[in-house]
Image (cartoon, rainbow, N blue to C red):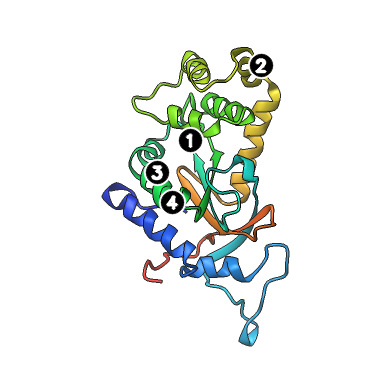
């Protein structure tokens, strides 16, 4: 779920990632114990064998769309909005360290999910540019440019970014104007809603077996109260 803001943002994210890769966070243990397509386990007295704060969800995983080793057992999904100030803060302040310590080392695969908010007038157009860059195998170079400061999210900016990262201009233009691209963004929003994602940036952390195309991710249950950080 939403990570702490301000000066503790980087440290909080590092704490979550470290606990997940070590299987020490209680929600990470839930993900390793059960599959989302199976009935819940029950412990002594018929109670579910999971922390009261955690809900297990299944999320599709495409290794080709992930940053890092597609064979990584821990997967982080980043639900983001290109106009979101805290998303830009994460990209500038936290992501470089996270990529260095977890992605480049093969411990974590990172998947970017567009979640444009209606309060941001250019977010949907930017999401379309990012989605089209992904179809050309250039998601992460485009994402890096779209999240740079100062904010530059005009149509001309999208075209310039596409040229800089080697995307053919005519193909990019066709993609961003294709109704199928807008449909893909809507499907992503529906998935975010299904997963309980509200706002940005939101991170889901899950685990998978090497052969699986589906990740067992966890999120905080609605109305579960505050989760202790000392787990």
* The label number, if any, that marks residue 164 in the structure image: none
Gap in Å between the C-alphas at discs 1 and 3? Answer: 15 Å
Q: Which residue is mark 1?
A: 81
Gap in Å between the C-alphas at discs 1 and 2? Answer: 23 Å
Q: Residue furthest left?
A: 7
Q: Which residue is mark 4?
A: 2
**Can you give x and y, in whole percent of width and height, for residue 10 in the image?**
33, 50
- In the image, which is nearer the foreground, mark 2 or mark 3? 3
C-beta proximity under 8 Å, tags 1 and 2: no
Q: Quadrant of residue 151?
A: top left
Q: Which residue is mark 3?
A: 95
Front residue of this view, candidates 103 and 77: 103
Front residue of this view, candidates 101 and 122: 101
Front residue of this view, candidates 184 and 119: 184
Q: Earlier in the sequence, mark 1 or mark 3?
A: 1
Q: Earlier in the sequence, mark 2 or mark 4?
A: 4
* The label number, if any, that marks residue 174 in the structure image: 2
Which residue is found at the position 69% from the left and 57% from the top? 211
| SS under mark 2 | helix
- In the image, which is nearer the foreground, mark 2 or mark 4? 2
Q: Is residue 201 above or below residue 215?
A: above
Q: Earlier in the sequence, mark 1 or mark 2?
A: 1
Q: Is residue 31 left or right of residue 5?
A: right
Q: Is residue 55 above or below residue 172?
A: below
Which residue is found at the position 52% from the left and 72% from the top? 51
């Amino acid at each position: 779920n939403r990570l702490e803001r301000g000066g503790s943002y980087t440290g909080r994210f590092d704490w979550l990632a470290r606990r997940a890769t070590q299987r020490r966070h209680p929600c990470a243990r839930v993900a390793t114990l059960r599959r989302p397509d199976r009935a819940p386990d029950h412990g002594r007295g018929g109670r579910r064998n999971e922390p009261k704060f955690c809900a297990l969800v299944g999320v599709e995983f495409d290794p080709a769309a992930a940053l890092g080793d597609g064979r990584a057992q821990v997967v982080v999904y980043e639900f983001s909005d290109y106009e979101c100030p805290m998303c830009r803060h994460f990209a500038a302040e936290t992501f470089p360290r996270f990529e260095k310590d977890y992605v480049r080392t093969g411990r974590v695969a990172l998947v970017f999910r567009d979640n444009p908010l209606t309060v941001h007038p250019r977010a949907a157009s930017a999401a379309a540019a990012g989605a089209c860059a992904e179809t050309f195998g250039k998601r992460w170079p485009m994402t890096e440019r779209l999240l740079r400061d100062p904010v530059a999210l005009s149509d001309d900016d999208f075209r310039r970014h596409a040229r800089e990262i080697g995307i053919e201009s005519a193909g990019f233009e066709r993609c961003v104007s294709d109704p199928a691209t807008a449909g893909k963004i809507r499907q992503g929003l529906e998935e975010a809603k299904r997963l309980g994602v509200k706002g940005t940036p939101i991170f889901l952390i899950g685990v998978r077996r090497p052969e699986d195309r589906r990740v067992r991710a966890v999120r905080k249950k609605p109305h579960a109260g505050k989760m202790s950080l000392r787990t």
